[in-house]
Amino acid sequence: MRISSDSTTPIRDYVQSAIAQIKDAIPLDARIDGIINIRMTTVVQKAKGGGIDLQVLNMGADVSANQTQEITIPIRILTETGQAVEDAMKAEAVSRKAKAEADRKLEEMKSAALSNPAVQPSHGVRHADSYPGALPGLR
């Protein structure tokens, strides 16, 4: 059963409008510090091309409850300071990940070198057997 377009709003339009209205409602001397949960009743319909079309149900729409589902989207609206903190935290996480990867590779190289001593570099030092007249006990 197709629900009329007068009864629904595309979820993107609904969320963008809700965020814009929340930002506009905040006084200049206040800020949002935390997460805002936007709760909405939705319906899923088959979209053109075979996908799904998630729509937010408008107030007063005549739809049976078994055709709807309620979803909550947590949204954090960042101020400039909050965005800077978030960016710094992401950069630190990327740095920690890169260091951990480098440490892991170094440990693999050390392990491989210890398990295969024949691969050790000689640094120009010749084995005792390669010297003419080497003593038998040094071979």
Image (spheres, grey):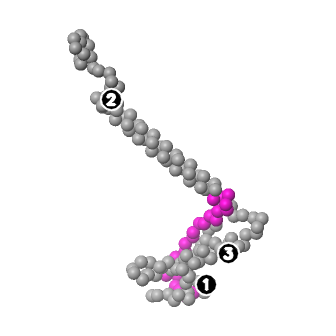
- Residue at position x 47%, y 79% in the image: 53
Report x, y in % for residue 59: 61, 84
Residue under label 3, please give it: 21
Q: Which amino acid does label 2 sit on?
A: Gln
Q: Quadrant of the C terminus?
A: top left
SS of the residue at dot 2?
A: loop
> Is 65 a magenta residue?
yes
- Residue at position x 64%, y 62% in the image: 78
Residue 120: assigned label: 2
Residue under label 1, please give it: 59
- Residue at position x 51%, y 89% in the image: 4
Viewed as shown, does residue 29 lie left or right of 130?
right
Q: What residue type is labelled 1?
A: Met
Viewed as shown, does residue 129 lie left or right of 8?
left
Range shown magenta = 61-83
Viewer-proximal residue among 78 and 129: 129
Query: Which mark is first along the chain, 2 or 3?
Result: 3
Query: Which mark is first along the chain, 1 or 3?
Result: 3
SS of the residue at dot 1?
A: loop
SS of the residue at dot 3?
A: helix
The count of marks equals 3
Q: Distance between the residues labelled 2 and 1?
A: 75 Å
Asked whether the residues under the numbered discs 3 and 1 touch, taking CB atoms below 8 Å apart as contact, a structural biologist would say: no
User: Dot 1, crowdedness within 10 Å: few (<14), some or many (≥20)?
Assistant: few
Q: Which amino acid does label 3 sit on?
A: Gln
Viewed as shown, does residue 17 lie left or right of 117?
right
Does the image show residue 113? yes
